[in-house]
Image: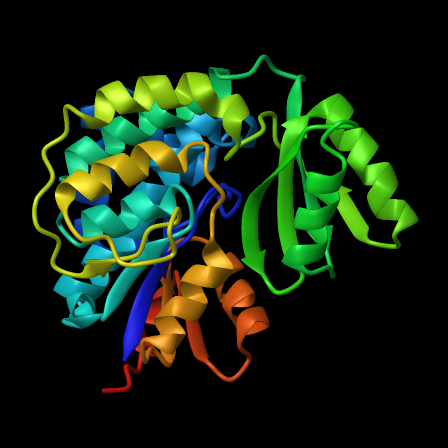
Amino acid sequence: MFSVIFPGQGSQFVGMCKDLHDKYALIQNLFKEADEILGFPLSKLILSGPKEELDLTENTQPAIFLVSYSIFKLIKEEFKIDLNKANFLAGHSLGEYSALSSAEALSFSDTLKILKIRGKAMQSSVPKGVGGMVAVLGSEIKIIENLVNENKNKYECFIANDNSVGQIVLSGNIDDLEKIMVDLKSANIKNIKLPVSAPFHCKLMNNATIVMKEEIAKLNFKEPKNTLISNVTSREITDSNELKDLLVQQIESRVRWRESILFMIDSGVNQFIEIGPSKVLSGLVKRIDRNIKVSAINTEEDIKLINIDE
């Protein structure tokens, strides 16, 4: 059994997908179509930057989706490898939208548009410089949960991502994050302030939730070709109404990535194929279970090496 997984924000880089774009008309056409749908040259940002603009959340989100979706389609249509035979499709945060569209539950056009809106809403939900995120390394989720809960009168921080064994991300106001970083250091727990300008996946994103609730209600979802896993519940999504609710909740909810991977493994999955830029998720999966087969696919050579265990 195998699952296809899609990366989220932070995996982007200028020039991602360039070799495939230069060689394959299918990807050139998707990039051109995306520019027309969004009304600005997203493809230029992806292929040649500048990095500062690509890294703006409202650009990053549709950009990573476009690259992931394009590679997925190329594998299916040019290389005749049917990834829709996957037992599950899942994505990390915005990657969940890549999974939705690849499973044909949401159209390419609608996915691009909603991610542009989502990125802008998340970026503007909190004034720049007010909120941030901190990576906590080498600790356990229960220890960090206890630290957050026991110090609510001292600071208000939130677990934004439970990414893997030993990698947890906190969100909050800068002042509160600096206080918890002192406590983490005192407990000899390694932590690093992340280069992001907003506190994603916590209640400080409430303004973005309001925007997304209204926008997601307008979307037309179809029956997905694959079983989808929700970041919010780390379980299967059962129907389109639940899907809409979970996508709204996802803005402020913890990304339960470690639990999602474990759920898929417990369901019989023994192989993960990461589709998109970089290899971030492949590294996380290996930390969760080093015995699992994992491959990151973002070049022609990677595609040729795909070997799905039947």
The quadrant in which the N terminus is found is bottom left
Q: Residue furthest top?
A: 127
Which residue is drawn at the image coordinates 16% and 33% (left, top)?
109
Q: Position of residue 152 (x, y in %)?
A: 71, 31
131, above or below 55, in the image: above
260, above or below 99, in the image: below
Camera sees residue 21: no
Which residue is drawn at the image coordinates 44% and 46% (left, top)?
8
Quadrant position of residue 305: bottom left
Camera sees residue 203: yes
Quadrant position of residue 290: bottom right
- For residue 116, side relative to residue 132 (left or right): left
Which residue is drawn at the image coordinates 46% and 61% (left, top)?
259
Q: Position of residue 161 (x, y in %)?
A: 55, 47
Which residue is drawn at the image coordinates 38% and 23% (left, top)?
209
Question: How many numbered discs, if any?
Answer: 0
In the image, 192 versus 80, the foreground residue is: 192
Q: How is the image coloured?
A: rainbow
Q: Position of residue 63 (x, y in %)?
A: 37, 37
Q: Residue furthest right?
A: 186
The quadrant in which the C terminus is found is bottom left
- For residue 176, side relative to residue 14 (left or right): right
In the image, 110 versus 239, the foreground residue is: 239
119, above or below 64, in the image: above
Q: Position of residue 232 (x, y in %)?
A: 39, 46
- For residue 123, side relative to residue 142 (left or right): left
